[in-house]
Image: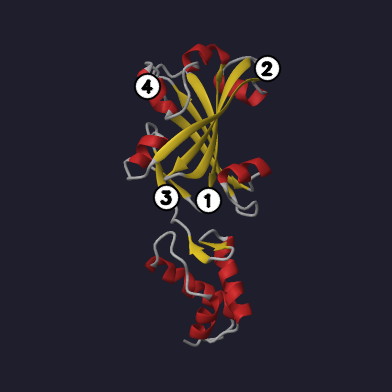
Amino acid sequence: MNLSRQDEPVYRELADILRRELADYRAGDFLPGEVMLAERFGVNRHTLRRAIDELVFEGSLLRRQGKGTQVLERPLIYSMTAESAYSQSLSAQGHGVQALLLKRRYCFASREEAQYLGIAEMAPMIELQTLRKLDNQPVSLIRHRYCASHAPLLADYNGGSLRQYLRERDMPLTRTQSLIGARLPNREEAALLLMPRHLPALSVFTLSRDRDGRAVELAQSTSRSDRFQYQVVT
């Protein structure tokens, strides 16, 4: 196959072709070897590598030392509604979902957190940090913060869906505000999510209230942008 070699750099044109062809692969499959691909497209290996680099950078492919170039999972879609719960929503799509408790600690409310929760600045808070895995692969880190008065209610939480845990204790929460952004992960986040630090992470800040309208939870999630897409449902 010969590329058109028009104004677009050849490696980018080749990257576009490879990107379209990924639809014919399953996650975990390996691309043909570089020599074979270079011969097929009539380019040298340097041009082919630059094309593959484009797809590696955007999170579609992963180079495995000594094995080749592997196709990664397609991004999962999480529909965000006022009542949706992470674990239940993705379990319904047929994925194995785990929520692991990484850390439990006490902290103090910042001015912004105090305003959201209607408490005093520097009031004591309890923070739970969880790692979410889909099909045994880490995809999201979530920091949940509550007024310290809820500590007894949260004392028995050791993992799993926090939404479900609170619902079973007669405190169903409703998401009332979400702010979605993107940023580069820090070193700890990248290590826990097994992602390169140059790949942007999705960041979502969420405020949730109880059935009486009281602000109860502030959650800040950091998710792999190559594995996750948010669909806002109104």
The circle on residue 215 is: none
For discs 1 and 2, the disc positioned in front in the rendered view: 1
Query: Is residue 8 among the parts visible in the rendering?
Result: no
Query: Label 1 sits on what residue type?
Result: Ser
Q: Is residue 66 left or right of residue 211?
A: right
Query: Label 3 sits on what residue type?
Result: Leu
Q: CA distance from mark 4 to mark 2?
A: 28 Å
Query: Label 2 sits on what residue type?
Result: Met
Q: 33 or 139, which is in the foreground?
A: 33
Q: Residues within 10 Å of mark 4 (few under 14, many from 20)?
A: few
Q: Which residue is mark 4?
A: 167
Residue located at (62% from left, 53% from top):
196
Q: Provide the secondary structure element on which disc 1 rests.
A: loop
Q: Position of residue 126 (x, y in %)?
A: 58, 19
Q: CA distance from mark 3 to mark 2?
A: 38 Å
Q: Residues within 10 Å of mark 2 (few under 14, many from 20)?
A: few
The circle on residue 76 is: 3
Sequence-wise, the earlier of marks 3 and 1 is 3
Residue located at (57% from left, 74% from top):
12
